[in-house]
Image (cartoon, rainbow, N blue to C red):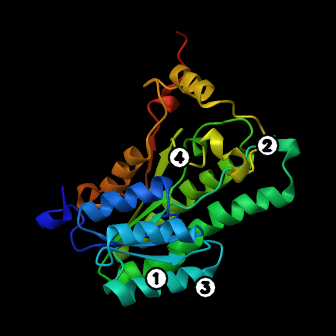
Amino acid sequence: MGSGSGTGRLDGRVVIISGGARGQGEQAARLFTAEGARVVLGDLLDDEGKRLAEELGPERAVYTHLDVREEADWERMSELAVERFGKVDGLLNNAGILRFSGLTDTSLAEYRQVVDVNQVGCFLGMKTVAPHIEAAGGGTIVNTASYTALAGMAFVASYAATKAAIVGMTRVAAMELAGRGVRVNAMCPGAIDTPMTNPSQVAENGLAVDQGSQAELDALYAKVVPQGRIGRPEEVARLALFLTSDDSSYVTGQPFVVDGGWLAGVSLF
């Protein structure tokens, strides 16, 4: 549904998206603006973020540098949203990093790095943006957790810990903010085809184990995922749209799994 129709599911809404330059954040930005929203994109990838905002158009999008670990960056981003678009109705806490390392091989520095980005970043986003959403008359917060918050996976201790923490914070925030008109939910994606999980990005993401070729990964997902494939970022974006729109008006405090059936169990055949 195009934004020009005047009947988009997010018409008139202003949504902040962290990690909005590429991957799931980029797809959410594209879908949200197509559904009538105006978006404020934050990321460390300034060139990609600026290009996306320019493509979406100044009447629909603006980009700003955001280090989710820094409270001042969150405050500046929230102020930019109000200055540019007049209010803030929603937050998509999407930024995150992934590190593969065995539990006993994970350095304290690496563990803290993942906690600072994934867990502290999500906390600061909610803490900073929630008052603006309340001031706008209420709205939504959607936090990006993970399949690994609900099921074990080897070599991702730091990542899984932060994502489980996000689910816990989501429930607490939903309880505290319900009376202020703010709904808070979490998405728990499984394997999604984004730069963070693509084997071509191994060096960039600092992965400490060999993920194998794309063909090997495709074969793995075909075996372990009931739907037989890796997920697409636009599929996660559609869940984010549901949780940000009035379609989910009586939903808060919940984790939503989007994983092609991976969490359902193990297939023997």
Q: How far apart are marks 3 and 2 (CA)?
A: 32 Å
Contact (Cβ within 8 Å) of mark 1 with mark 2? no
Label 1 or label 4, whichever lies nearer to me, is 4
Q: How crowded is mark 3: few (under 14 residues within 10 Å), some or many (20 or more)?
A: some
Contact (Cβ within 8 Å) of mark 1 with mark 4? no
Q: Name the disc covering residue 92, or none.
A: none
Q: Distance between the residues labelled 4 and 2?
A: 18 Å
Horizontal and vertical percent for residue 72? 60, 85
Residue receiving disc 4: 194
Element marked by disc 1 = helix
Horizontal and vertical percent for residue 27? 40, 55
Element marked by disc 4 = loop
- What's the residue type where badge 2 is placed? Ala
> Of residues 123 and 98, which is closer to you in this image?
98
Q: Distance between the residues labelled 3 and 4?
A: 28 Å
Residue receiving disc 2: 208
> For residue 84, what is the image quadrant?
bottom left
- What's the residue type where badge 1 is placed? Ser
Label 1 or label 2, whichever lies nearer to me, is 2
> Of residues 173 and 117, which is closer to you in this image?
117
Horizontal and vertical percent for residue 115? 70, 61
Residue receiving disc 3: 72
First of labels 3, 1 by sequence position? 3
First of labels 3, 4 by sequence position? 3
Element marked by disc 3 = helix
> Of residues 197 and 51, which is closer to you in this image?
51
Q: Is residue 141 above or below residue 81?
A: above
- Residue at 23% over, 74% down: 12
